[in-house]
Amino acid sequence: MLPLLFAAPSWPYRLSSVPVYCRGLTIYFATAWTFLLASSHSIAEAPAGGNSSTDQTSYEKYFVERVEPLLREHCFECHSHESGDSSGNLMLDSLAGMLVGGSRGPSIVPAQPDQSLLLRAVLYDDNELQMPPSEKLDDEAIATFRTWLADGAAMPEALRGDLSSMGSAGSVDLRTLAVQTHWAYQPPRRWSPTAASTPASVSASNIANTIDAIIESNLTNAGLSLSPPADRTTLLRRLSYDLTGLPPTQAETEQFLSDPRDDQAVTSELIDRLLASPSFGERWARFWMDVSRYADNKGYVFQEDREYPGAHQYRTWLIEAFNQDLPYDVFVTRQLAADLLVPATPDQPNTQPTTDTASVAQTAGTNSASDEKPPASESTEEATAATSVARSSAIDNSGASSNDLPALGFLTLGRRFLNNRNDIIDDRLDVVSRGLMGMTLACARCHDHKYDPLTQADYYAMSGVFLNTDEPGGEPWPHRLIDSPEPRQSFILIRGSPGRHGDKVPRRFVSLLAPDEKPFKDGSGRIELAQEIVSLDNPLTARVIANRVWLQLTGSSLVESPSDLGMRSPEPQQLALLDQLAIALSVDQQWSLKSFIRSIVSSRVYQQRSDHRADCAEVDPANFLYWKMNRRRLEFEAFRDTLLARVGRLDRHMYGASEAIAAAPFSPRRTVYAYIDRQNLPQVFRTFDAASPDNHTPARAQTSVPQQGLYLLNSNFVAELAQQLADRTEQAAPVPSAQATWMFEQVLCRAPNAAEQTLLNEFMQAASEGRTGNSASQSSPLAQLAGALLAANELAYID
Amino acid sequence: MIRSDNQTPPLTRRELLSRSGMGFGALALQHLLSGTAAAEQSSPSGINPLLPKQPQFPATAKRVIHIFANGGPSHLDTFDPKPALTKYAGQPMPGETPRTERKTGALFASPFRFRKYGQSGLDVSELFPHVAQHADELCVIRSMYADVPNHEPSLLLMNTGEARLVRPSMGSWLTYGLGTDNQNLPAFVAMCPGGYPIQESQNWQAGFLPGVYQGTYIDTKHKSIDKLIENVRNERIGLVDQRRQLDLLQNLNRLHQAPRAEDSQLESRIQSFELAYRMQMEAAEVFDVSREPQYVLDAYGPGVQARQLLIARRLVEHGVRYVQVWHGAGQPWDNHDDIETQHRKLAGQCDRGIGALLSDLRQRGMLEDTLVIWGGEFGRTPTVELPKEGANQGKVNGRDHNHWGFTTWLAGGGVRGGYVHGATDEFGFKAVENRVHVHDLHATLLKLLGFDHEKFTYRWAGRDYRLTDVHGRVINELIA
């Protein structure tokens, strides 16, 4: 599942961004919209590079030396000013001409050869479009076109042409073209089944069915089909982890397996119960903590106090927000502007938010005191009530109270960079733009974005919002935001250098999505910023969160890079599904994440088996089309929680301050409550691919390194758990011959089969004999057995 | 626990193999003992991101030992002699004094004598007589410069190529690009006795690269292996018993895997446990310098610097890709006062060990493809630092930070030996001739290791990042 480091990126991304190795990309200080001309090269094709600017020149040289002669020889006869012919209204003698295209639309999409009609034409695969008409070009020529397009379609300035001279496309500029052609900048489109491909069961009101319909229609087209439904044991485990981050208990397993009702009724009830469990919030809060680069301290700040006192209040707020199913638009808005939303009533003056760190947590604790029970005790009525709260269609800010102030942790809990103001703003801008919109705005700090239609002015217009957001002292850390009393003017900083002021820029949203460039009026503009982000007209926000949730539940991302939907993010193979999910979440379900998650996990796609099928793998080896469910490894938090739970040690107490988990005495609390030391993150977090607290994490890596084995074989933490499990086993099963079996059932939640039973027996006998012999091991055979079982693959993977 | 001092003698590999029980475990161990190639074949590529990889083009250096004199050693008192300093000592420096961190006064002569060494006639001060024996192997860059006169940004710049933001360290870049030759040891080791240097583990951070490329910190103050490497020892279970335990685990895993045979993740995790088992033995062996013959121990000399330099040699010998050797916690070379006694003490702690390391690598035929780097985050001023309350009160015998000009030397790995590159001004304040920025050094180091610094990139957050960001040029004169 790990991306191949030295291979071309494969689709779809399952993990963190696939490293693109050996790209000859250098930073090129582009002027406006030359992103279309910028380029990257594979090493094999790379022209000899000098410094950055000669690199760009060398890409242009590639065009002049290799591409232009091909165009001249094979295309200009019918598509150039020189010949005076423009067949199909298409001119290929300038970049402008290519971009504007002819009767079939733009002939090229820079950086995306497969989206370019020019390449499709020369490939001769499409019977309707084959160029040049005389005969197919040789492979080398086609490869040359492909390389040139992949590298961004660079062309010397003199040859680029003037778009304004392009007749009907007179008002079109390159940037508008980008906005008009890139998939992610178009509004999501609702899926409408054609009669031919509609399975009989489709019901427009049922989103789960629509997910199935879209995927089944694609599978059918490829001659494939969904796998059969997973058995109850598998489904229970999969749902428990995905919704609560915890394994099912033995009792839950027995009850679920023996329930006489039909599978659908039982599963549906299970889903409701898990969604209503307080553990749901703990699981999904951690998901969001990856997005928001959570840590309990500031990173390196020399001699200043390194702690973020009260950082955990942000986590408490997240857990409650997910459990209460705060609509995502409100969820986002409060994280950007809670301080501005708190009503200034005599009871809750917004100028005096609570400074008592304990009180928020306490309040939180009280609210959920009844939820402290294990999920099994939750009733279905409660579950339904929790997710069916009606809300108005506009952003509902009326509900904000001073209890929501910790939501600001999303902005305030980043690295402090020795308190360099511009760097702190940059960090906030990055978590907002990449985390919420999949927009790499931080790339435009020193120059216009190289690929995306984002200018340096956009960067400083947006950063002006945070420039006008102050941090009053005396408040717990997550709360520390307030609009500046006096507005500060934001300037473009030339090459990002604080000493070099360029033009003034008003605070506003990125012009890509708000072309009128209307300045924000209200204080810092944070509320207006939030409104722009969660607006139903924003084509990115809903796609980004829908894809993140889909990735979390299925183990594969629909978008190649979950936090970069810019120009270099190719159109998803399942764009129709992504769009449908985005619309389902934002429109149909009015941003209810619980409803959205329920739809996905209720689908037959989600509930299918994860078994390999040779015939399907031959057609679609990477499972792009979802002919099976992906097998997934537990992430660090779920795995550590599982170890604690299986030994009977897991402390389900919710909320409160973070606890160190890397050193003894080992906290038995859920890993979501682990203290995250941004500066010196303990090795165990890195070893198990936990999220880095330095930056927003788009998706986790999934490595298998020997340090993980060492941790399980030798760490004091696992040794302590193994000993405790051995002790428990001896108490629960006094007859020695029954102990191994009891322990096996305890850990894996099922009885051993005959082969496993034999292994257990043989091990116990050999280990006991070894012990009576000359062994120096302090660890008892039972404790050794416990260590082996806790390290088993079966425990670490979800089928 | 089976210890070598216990009643049970340590097991040989062969014995372990013969006792390792039935089934899979024995077979897997056999694979492992036959070397990394087997492990490579049996674990699908990409699953273990640390498997060895080829660089972009043939390289002269295959591994790195970076000796970091943290705090800022004085180039004027070590490798960059300035007669004018002696001549005009006590007088104000002509012209404007460049801005540094604190206030400085008159020119301050080096209290140390310089001598010429080797056929190249390289000037080295009396502080480094052992290093000086390798004069003809040293490539001394006297025209280094950085951006600011403060420790934090300069340390980050030297280690990550970026002074403020979170970026991967050079060691992380290289383990990302090259993997490592020995899967039983960490790929990138950062040793510092007694605690962290300033800026702490950010000096060996993986940044946005996957966490496996992060440097593994080792506190070389400790001598016992279980304190040196996390979880490498288990006091509760002996190796024979643990092998039996592992066999059970792997056999259960095989039964679990049988109906899921096509899933390479499962196989990969199975293999990682075998590697872990092996690592226990190999790591313990490598960090145990007492296994060295007495004459080698004598050559390196006493003390923690000697010990960690010897460990560094043992690590690279066993296939570790990148080793950093920090002088000590905090900023030991930061001698704002008492520079004569302090520098003498510090150099005295490491000179012999560094000299021995170079000889040792040479004798083992490893100096040719092992790049050794020595230097700090910046140098020191030729002018004396003025006393300041609460700092160097009452003392006028030290030097302030100097990022305008300083010295870094390289040896081995294909660099040009017996060569001095560039020069500082008459007094040694600023690099003036053939100036080499830290980015240029990085670009050159990458070239020695087989990478074009402009094409060695990692895409993150929408951009293709480089160690040298948008800077750097290869200094070809440094390359033999």
Image: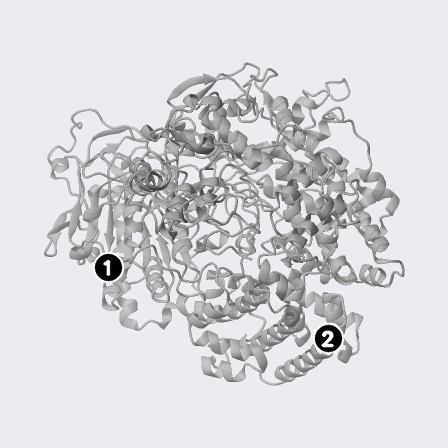
Which residue in the protein does label 1 denote? B355
Dividing the image into 4 quarters, which one contains the C terminus of chain A? bottom right
Residue A124 appears in the picture as rendered: yes
Picture layout, residue B443 above or below residue B57: above
Q: Which residue is mark 2?
A: A740
Which quarter of the image is occupied by the N terminus of chain A? bottom right
Left or right for A126, reference A645: left
Which color mode does the image show?
one colour
Q: Secondary structure at mark 2?
A: helix
The count of marks equals 2
In the image, residue A99 sits, relative to residue B69, either above or below, namely: above
Check contact, mark 2 vs mark 1: CB within 8 A. no
Residue A520 in percent (x, y) is at 58, 18
Question: Foreground: A445 or A353?
Answer: A445
Task: Check disc 2: other Cα within 10 Å, few if <14, some if 14-19, many if 20+.
Answer: many
Quadrant in which residue A165 is drawn? top left
A469, above or below B215, in the image: above
* Badge 2: chain ID: A
* Tags 2 and 1 on a common chain: no
Above or below for A252 versus A205: below
**x, y (%) of residue A142?**
40, 48
Of residues A734 and A44, the one nearer the viewer is A44
In the rendered image, the residue lying farthest to the right is: A260
Q: On the rendered structure, is A479 left or right of B64?
A: right
